[in-house]
Image (cartoon, helix red, strand yellow):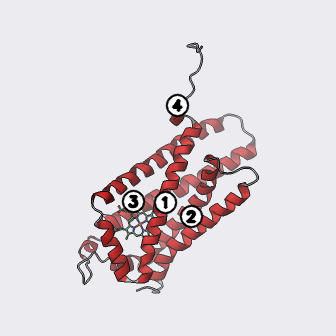
Amino acid sequence: MTSSSQKKAPSFFASSIGKKWVVALTGVLLIGFITLHLLGNLAIFLGPEAINSYSEKLHHLGVLLWIVRLGLLVVAGLHVFFTMALWRENKKASLEKYAVRQKLETTLYARSMRLSGLVVLGFVLFHLAQFTWELTNPDYKNWMDALGRHDVYRMLISAFSNLWVAGFYLLSVGLLALHLAHGVASLFQTLGLTSEKLRPRFERVSLIVAVLFFLGYASIPLAVFFKVVS
Ligand code: HEM
C-alpha cells in the first residue's frame, strides 16, 4: 500500500532515462533526415539537371512535404527541449559531491555537446533563411532553369563561391560531425545496444559515421569554391 508520505516514482518523461530515450530516438530521426538530405544534395555532382529535378520533385510532394517539415520541426524541438532538461538535471547533480575526474569529464562532454548543438541550431536557421526562405538573397526566388524549374544548382554555385559562406558551412558541418561523434556513441548507450566491452567499438563506429557526414557535407562547398563544379 502506498502511504501519502511515500514519494511517487517520476513519470517516464520526467525521469532521466525517459528524457534520454526521447533525445536518443529524436536523434535517430534527425540522423535519418541528414542522411536523406545529404544524398539529395550530392546530386549537385551529377549536374544541374539532377539537382534541379530532385528539388522540383520534392516540392511537388505538396501536403506530404508539409507533414514531413512539421514532423521535423517537432522532432528537432523535442531533441533540443529534452537535451536542455537533461543539462539542467546534470547541473543540479554536479552541485552534489562527485569525484573530481568524473565531474571534469562530464563537464567537458556536456560543454562540447552544448556548443556544437547551439552552432548547428544557429546554422540551420541561417541555412533556412538562405535556401528555403531565400531572405539573404531574395533574387534566388527568380532563378529558373531553361525548363522553368527553380535553379537550385545556380543558387548553390552562387552561395558557395563566397569564401565566408563556404567557410561558415565548413565550420558548421565540422561541429555537426563533432556533435555526431559524441551523440551517436551516447545514443547506442541509451538504447541499451552497447556494453562496457563493446563500448570502444561503438565509439569507433560513431567516429566513422561523423567523419563520413563531414566529408559528404563538406565536399559540396569545397567543390564549388575550388570550381570542381561550376
Ligand atoms: C553543404 C551542405 C548543405 C547543402 C548544399 C544544403 C542544401 C539545401 C537546399 C538547397 C535546401 C532547399 C531545398 C529546397 O527547398 O529546394 C535545403 C533545405 C534544408 N536544409 Fe540543407 N543543405 C546542407 C546542409 C544541411 C545540414 C547540415 C542540415 C541540418 C543539420 C540541413 C538542413 C536543412 C533543412 C532543415 C532544410 C529545409 C527543408 C525543407 O523545409 O524543405 N542542411 N538545404
Q: Which residue is mark 4?
A: 11
Looking at the picture, tell me which residue is in the foreground, 168 or 210: 210
Closer to the chain start, of discs 4 and 1, is 4
Q: State the quadrant of the N terminus.
A: top right
- Residue 13: percent from left, percent from top: 51, 36
Say which of marks 1 and 2 sits in front. 1
- Exactly how many numbered labels are in the figure? 4
Establish if 144 lies above or below 200: below
Closer to the chain start, of discs 2 and 3, is 3
For marks 4 and 3, give the CA distance: 33 Å
Say which of marks 4 and 3 sits in front. 4
Say which of marks 2 and 3 sits in front. 2
> Horizontally, is 151 left or right of 36 in the view?
left
Q: Residue at x 24, y 81 (%)?
A: 147
Q: Which residue is mark 2?
A: 177
> Horizontally, is 176 left or right of 95 in the view?
left
Q: Which residue is mark 1?
A: 32
Name which residue type carries label 1. Answer: Gly
> Horizontally, is 188 left or right of 133 in the view?
right
Say which of marks 4 and 2 sits in front. 4
Q: Is residue 183 visible?
A: yes
**Disc 2 C-beta below 8 A from ligand 1:** no
Q: Which residue is mark 3?
A: 125
Write down which quadrant ligand 1 falls in: bottom left
Q: Quadrant of residue 175?
A: bottom right
